[in-house]
Image (cartoon, rainbow, N blue to C red):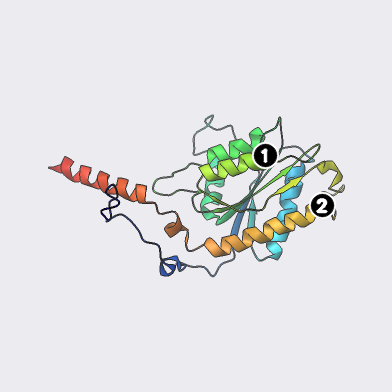
Amino acid sequence: MDKLPNIDFERLDLPTPAKLEPVGDLDHPPRILMLYGSLRERSFSRFLTYEAARILEHFGAEVKIFDPMELPMVGSVPETHPKVVELRELCLWSEGQVWCSPERHGAVTAVMKNQIDWIPLEQGAVRPSQGRTLAVMQVCGGSQSFNVVNTLRLLGRWMRMFTIPNQSSVPMAYKEFDDAGRMRPSAYYDRVVDVMEELVKFTLLLRGRTDYLTDRYSERSERARKAIDRQIGKL
């Protein structure tokens, strides 16, 4: 302790394997929320999302896909708007998420970012995104790029999510889907299978443990200081 004079040892947790034992009701299938970033009728990000959803369902997950149509721009309506409420309730329901966006001007689309911006970091005492697993995918109109998945990773970290290592980037997406919107067999399709398989594995691995994994020394210390301040304020 003498070597760490700046640490409050009453708030310091010492991790052990026993503390990583899962807790809670885990008998249900993994709950996966999927977001896509385009409103076009022939939307390749939507096609890829639905293709990935079929794979997730085969792995035993329960999947819900949010339709971003009619979701207002963030800040333009109250948080009680039905589409905002729907999105936030789905986030709370989810244990893992998939974000899939086209690349627009080297970045995610406004449709994609608007959905993420409507998800609050805190909702009362609850954090709707914290501790969820996340898989990221993108579709490209031209050659393969990783701008979108890199941006989505940054956003996932900011939202305190566990982004899995694997990812999918589909170049020249118009070549990869048939007239019915189904993805053709290819190495890109195989990668989507890899990503969904990995997402289910990590979701199963982390659920029931996320409260402990996201419990931070700095936040415990801050709560303790605020509690002391409240007691002093009552004197």
Q: Give the residue displayed 49% in from the left and 39% down from the top.
A: 80
Q: Give the position of the C terminus as an image quadrant.
A: top left
Element under label 2? Answer: loop
Task: Look at the picture and state if 72 lies above or below 130.
Answer: above
**The one of 6 and 30 positioned closer to us in this rendering:** 6
Q: Give the residue displayed 71% in from the left and 32% down from the top.
A: 104
**The one of 220 and 120 positioned closer to us in this rendering:** 220
Q: Give the residue displayed 73% in from the left and 54% down from the top.
A: 192
Residue 118, position as x, y percentages in the image = 54, 38
Which residue position holds label 2? 183
* Mark 2 surroundings within 10 Å by alpha-carbon count, few (fewer than 14), some (14 through 19), many (20 or more): many
Marker count (numbered)? 2
For marks 1 and 2, give the CA distance. 20 Å
Residue 172, position as x, y percentages in the image = 82, 41
Amino acid found under the numbered disc labelled 2 = Met
Q: Give the residue displayed 66% in from the left and 53% down from the top.
A: 166
Amino acid found under the numbered disc labelled 1 = Val
Which numbered disc covers residue 148? Answer: 1
* Mark 1 surroundings within 10 Å by alpha-carbon count, few (fewer than 14), some (14 through 19), many (20 or more): many
**The one of 77 and 146 positioned closer to us in this rendering:** 146
Residue 24, position as x, y percentages in the image = 45, 66
Element under label 1? Answer: helix
**Is there any visible trace of residue 83 in the rendered image?**
no
